[in-house]
Amino acid sequence: MIKTLRAALLGTALALAGTATAAAQTAPTLRVGMAAQDVGRLDPHFAVSTIDRVVVAWMFNGLVRFKPGSIDPAQIEPDLAERWESSPDGRTWTFHLRRGVQFHGGFGELTADDVVFSLRKAGTAATSAFSADFRAFEAVEAVDPYTVRIRLRENVPSLLGIVTNYSGGYIVSRRAVEQRGADFVRSPIGTGPFALERVTPNQSAELTAHAQYFRGAPQIGRISYRFIPSDASRDLAYQNRELDVNYGRADQTWINRTRQVPNTTVDVFEPGELAVLHLNTTTPPFNDIRVRQALAHAVNRAELVRYRGQDVAREAQSVVPRGYLGFTADVPLLQPDAARTRQLLAEAGHPNGITIRVIHTQLPEMLNMMQVVQQQLRRAGITLDLQVVEHATFHQQIRQDLSPLVYYSAARFPVADIYLTQFFHGRSIVGTPTAVTNFSHCNQADRQIDAARVSTDINEQRRLWAEAQKILVQNVCGVPLIETLLVFARRNNVDYGYELNGSMSLGPLITEQSRLR
């Protein structure tokens, strides 16, 4: 009897898979060109690069989500959880899951057990790049198969921001992670509108529509996510109609030229990725604050904006991006002054200038901007010896503390706490057990960051976040450069199903509503 039942269930699963495959074959394919040699890690809790973040967002859900096309925390809405409530003190949150949500690949229905497993995984340094975000979690437990309770040891600025469809908030299949082990990074299982079919190294990632998606079967049958690192090659493929969506260069010349391509829309959208030169304050030459100050005086932000273009770039004003809750522009950024740079270098024992070996990515947009910075510094006596590596290798090496200067461009959930914690808190210093992305090894503002996180007074939080930014800038832990908006081009027959004003996944979110007209 048991064998008969299993056979029947298997037959049903195969029939459903066949139906889904047939639907995917008849529905249209969306072809997306990405500036990449290959993907890195598709386990969403390790997806740190733009390349990985974009595609991961098509495959996974969070308990809650940003409204498609928006990065406004006020517009966070239900995703895998259909409703939730919190205790009066804000330290206990209860989420009630949708019923019948199916994982890809026949991995069954989502339950509270998968959510508990996912959040614990996301909060563990060995299994997540975002574990620091979960430091305040005291316990995550399944109340019943469709109810999850989170208890916090202290208040956080935005609990919903931690469990949204972003970074550590993505929910994975426990069974798939345990069965696939290390292979999960290239064969992930989520609940999103698209499932990964295969990755062909240095060519593409192929995704197919998830016919059992809880919001309805996608109107697009397949997505071909193609790796084309050369801007020229990718642009030519788009012009030849081999691509429907093209990762754009965030510079004015590219935008102006692409806008002239027939039947093309260029989307420029938030968040602005803040580019910062992070300086390792604990090792030569940047353990001398005079050298850090010299480098800061050699940077000309207005020139960088002119190079990138007014449509897509704006001058950075702090070590936190503009528009984030807690941002302040009232910080003492050092102004361009080549003479002062040379004077400080001489005082620090480098009268003939200084050469610094720097590891940097080959990702075209970041490499081009770094080369402009390189020219600016050279004019003032600072030579950057760039060691250019593939993007995934870049991320590995900078986290091994192999570069005294790190150019890092990033957007985060728009609350100052997360940016300050990940990039400038002592717990986040690379090379430590709780490492995130603190490449500067600065910890001078830890007290202010910690106090703001647990405060329930928004005015006090703002004061503490502002104080932290001033301390970090005064210590030249990092040199803010510019904020660059995101740019993608698409053919006019591509309808995302929403107005693209912002995307925390750093690319267009392809949903069940997206279609090719």
Image: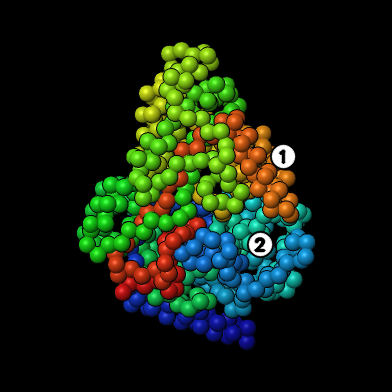
Q: Earlier in the sequence, mark 2 or mark 1?
A: 2
Instruction: Indicate the position of residue 75 as horizontal and vertical percent values.
Output: 56, 66
Q: Residue at the location (53% across, 69% down)?
A: 191
Is residue 481 left or right of 226 when viewed as pictured?
Answer: right
Vertical placement of 512 versus 141: above or below? below
Instruction: Indicate the position of residue 427 as horizontal and vertical percent values.
Output: 67, 40
Q: Tell me the mark number nearer the camera, choosing from 2 and 1.
A: 1
Front residue of this view, candidates 271 and 189: 271
Is residue 173 left or right of 513 when viewed as pictured?
Answer: right
- How many marks overall? 2
Is residue 207 left or right of 516 when viewed as pictured?
Answer: right
Which quadrant would residue 112 be assigned to in this image?
bottom right
Instruction: Name the kind of residue labelled 2 in the image.
Output: Phe
Quadrant where the N terminus sits is bottom right
Vertical placement of 486 versus 513: above or below? above
Whether residue 248 appears in this view of the structure is: yes
Q: CA distance from mark 2 to mark 1?
A: 31 Å
Which quadrant would residue 108 be assigned to in this image?
bottom right
Instruction: Name the kind of residue labelled 1 in the image.
Output: Arg
Give neighbour class at mark 1: few <14, some 14-19, many 20+ (Cα, 10 Å): few
Residue under circle 1? 447
Q: Residue at the location (43% across, 19% down)?
A: 339
Q: Residue at the location (53% across, 16% down)?
A: 348
| SS label for mark 2 | helix
Instruction: Indicate the position of residue 36 as horizontal and vertical percent values.
Output: 37, 49
Residue under circle 2? 117
Whether residue 362 appears in this view of the structure is: no
